[in-house]
Amino acid sequence: MPIYVYETLPEAQGEAPERFEVRQAMSEAPLTAHPESGRPVRRVLSGGLVTFTNGASGDSCAMPSGRGLPAMGCGAGNCCMN
């Protein structure tokens, strides 16, 4: 079951939201209230898990598709794994 991140909706200007995690089945409806305080909440979108592997040629900069393209997102054209 995935873990979802929620945050409380601020009730006053300048109030910081409280973030918390809840393990829920994907088929469950999102929470609308904090399980303990009952305050209104919203689900926060967050990044997922990404796994990088070496290309078939053993080139650590090859993309998983094996097309030999440089890795993206590593900054200024440099490979993360060199």
Image: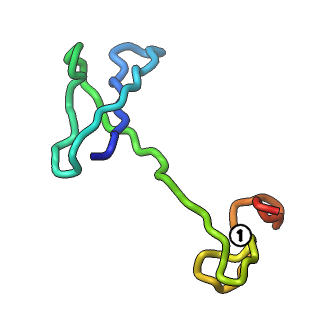
Residue labelled with disc 1: 71
Residue 43 is left or right of residue 64, and the answer is left
Residue at position x 16%, y 45% in the image = 28
Residue at position x 53%, y 58% in the image = 50
Along the line of sight, the residue nearer the viewer: 70 or 51: 51
Along the line of sight, the residue nearer the viewer: 58 or 70: 58
Q: Quadrant of residue 44?
A: top left
Position in image of residue 37 (x %, y %): 23, 13
Q: Residues within 10 Å of mark 1 (few under 14, many from 20)?
A: some
Height in image: 29 above or below 61?
above
Along the line of sight, the residue nearer the viewer: 77 or 65: 65
Q: Quadrant of residue 68?
A: bottom right
Residue 49 is left or right of residue 61, and the answer is left
Residue at position x 48%, y 15% in the image = 14
Which amino acid type is marked by label 1?
A: Ala
Query: Which quadrant of the figure contains the C terminus?
Result: bottom right
Position in image of residue 73 (x %, y %): 69, 61
